[in-house]
């Protein structure tokens, strides 16, 4: 956005609307948030998990796979083959949820127990509070790009003005946003919420 490569963005799906959001924005409780991830992997081939038997491949994939470069094997193009994410939320009392991490996506192999035929990451914003979206790139050897740092603590430390230069660089791997508590339904009239 305006050549600001440090700006972390995502989408919110709420009702019949799509909102473009940035780091620090607030989303509706119950909305879906969508992460379009990227990365750089200069030393391995691009070999996504795709089977031609997948019923979720785009129409025309078999006849013209080159129209869908994210789904076909390629030489070294500098891209990870997939991603994982997890989105813990710190509530108003300071407690942090510990949700499960996703499996690697995209995975267009219906014979896999990890079948996840999506290109973007999706998470439901169920709990109100401060959310920390942490993403991990996966390379062609299926190695997940983890760090030994607790990225939630690191984000809080850097956002409070602390941390080292290395911490500030690693902070870019966390996208924070807020989940607004759901509004009360209001008084009911003849058994119906207004």
Image (tube, rainbow, N blue to C red):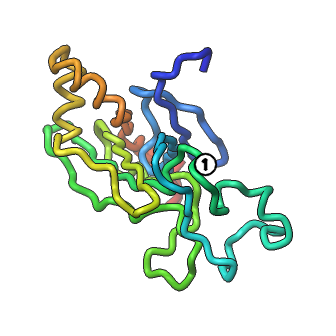
- List x then y, in percent, for residue 130: 29, 36
Nearest the camera: 143 or 42? 42
View extreme (bottom): residue: 111
Q: How many marks?
A: 1
* Residue drawn at 54 percent across, 69 percent down: 49
Q: Height in image: 32 above or below 152?
A: below
- List x then y, in percent, for residue 106: 54, 62
- List x then y, in percent, for residue 24: 39, 26
Q: Height in image: 101 above or below 7?
A: below
Q: Classify the position of the N terminus by image quarter.
A: top right
Instruction: Inspect this view and state whether residue 122 appears.
Output: no
- SS at mark 1 in the image: loop
Q: Within 10 Å of the Cα at label 1, are there few (<14), some (14-19), or many (20+) other Cα atoms? A: few
Nearest the camera: 137 or 11? 137
Instruction: Inspect this view and state whether residue 169 appears.
Output: yes
Nearest the camera: 154 or 38? 38
Side of 135 relative to 34 (left or right): left
* Residue drawn at 59 percent across, 46 percent down: 77
Nearest the camera: 17 or 6? 6
* Residue drawn at 59 percent across, 32 percent down: 20
* Residue drawn at 66 percent across, 47 percent down: 16
- The residue under label 1 is 15
Q: Height in image: 67 above or below 65?
A: above
Q: Height in image: 20 above or below 146?
A: above
């Amino acid at each position: 956005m305006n050549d600001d490569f440090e700006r972390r963005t995502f989408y919110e799906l709420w009702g019949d609307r799509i909102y473009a959001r940035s780091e620090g924005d607030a989303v509706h409780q119950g909305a879906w948030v969508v992460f379009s991830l990227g990365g750089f992997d200069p030393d391995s081939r691009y070999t996504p998990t795709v089977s031609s038997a997948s019923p979720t491949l785009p129409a025309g994939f078999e006849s013209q796979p080159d129209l869908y470069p994210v789904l076909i094997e390629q030489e070294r193009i500098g891209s990870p083959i997939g991603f994982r994410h997890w989105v813990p939320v710190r509530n108003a009392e300071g407690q942090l949820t510990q949700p499960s991490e996703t499996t690697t996506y995209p995975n267009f192999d219906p014979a896999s127990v990890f079948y996840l035929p999506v290109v973007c990451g999706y998470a439901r914003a169920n709990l109100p509070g401060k959310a920390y979206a942490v993403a991990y790139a996966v390379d062609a050897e299926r190695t997940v790009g983890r760090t030994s740092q607790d990225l939630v603590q690191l984000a809080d430390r850097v956002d409070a003005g602390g941390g080292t230069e290395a911490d500030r660089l690693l902070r870019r791997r966390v996208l924070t946003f807020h989940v607004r508590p759901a509004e009360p339904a209001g008084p009911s009239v003849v058994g119906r919420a207004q």
